[in-house]
Image (tube, grey):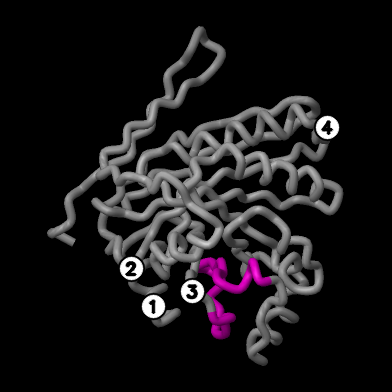
Amino acid sequence: MHHLVRYRLRLFVIGLAGASLLLVAAFRFQKGERPAFLSATASSSRMSQLPPVILWAWERPEQLDFIDPQKIGVAFLARTIFLRGDQTVGRPRFQPLALPAGARVIAVARIESDRHDAPTLSPAQIRAAANEIAQLGNLPNVLMVQVDFDATKGERTFYRELLSEVRAKLPSATLLSITALASWCKGDNWLDDLPVDEAVPMLFRMGIERKQFLSQFAAGERFSSQRCQASAGVSTDEPLAQLPRVERLYVFNPGVWSPADVNHLLETYNK
């Protein structure tokens, strides 16, 4: 769109003594002031500032300065956190991202547990991971931080404590979101007491449960967890004919986003 001014998020990786990496991020889209305080009752008002469609921008160069920021937001992978034994290792985003002026932005932290050297899930690991995630709330124009973690049942206590720590460390005006397995939202409700503003059920890569959930959606059933009722996550390569009624639709694309991809998803979901 020719009327949009092009702004870029540039990420530079600089070697430090040949060992560690430092990410220097320069946001070149307009900064907006945050409210000094966000009460619990103001959460829904703050959430309403998010557009109805949000594109996930994963770890690759993305040119998204063509989107209409009034209709479409961007949730970009900002940091990946690896839990291994006693270690917590954060890796920043390496790839550039171009956004239009006024874009509503969500910074995503992906957590990976090492299955060969299982993490200890210790208090020290909680603190270290929380520090990595909370830093994302200080990035310009970030309305919300989202955590993407496929926690096992044995990791749920750790995850709950981690989210509480993150919530305490985030700027008071910054919202907190998580992605959620569909099974977490229906019949396995452990989400409703988490200190988050939303949980986004992932309605793709569902495996053997896919047919069951699609049948329930077609029958008009909704997720029983209140945290899961406002948003849903889908993928461009698994379009759904039936969706629960939601306020925000997150969309993953296994390839690089293009104007044609965005137009197609808006047509598919009547957004």
**Which residue is drawn at the image coordinates 61% and 40% (left, top)?**
168
Q: Earlier in the sequence, mark 3 or mark 4?
A: 4
What residue is disc 3 on? 247
Three-letter amino acid code of the residue under disc 2: Lys
In the rendered image, the residue lying farthest to the right is 154
Determine the residue positioned at 18% across, 61% down.
1
Q: Residue at x 17, y 51 (%)?
A: 5
* Residue pointed to by mark 2: 71
Three-letter code, disc 4: Thr
Frontmost of labels 3 and 4 is: 3
Query: Which image quarter is the C terminus in?
Result: bottom left
Specify whether residue 200 is painted magenta.
no
Instruction: Please identify the residue farthest to the top as the structure is shown.
Output: 17
Looking at the rendering, the stretch of residues picked out in magenta corresponds to: 226-245
Question: Is 34 on the left-hand or right-hand side of 235?
Answer: left
Label 1 belongs to which residue?
271
Q: CA distance from mark 3 to mark 4?
A: 38 Å
Q: Which residue is mark 4?
A: 120
Distance between mark 4 and mark 1 Cα atoms: 44 Å
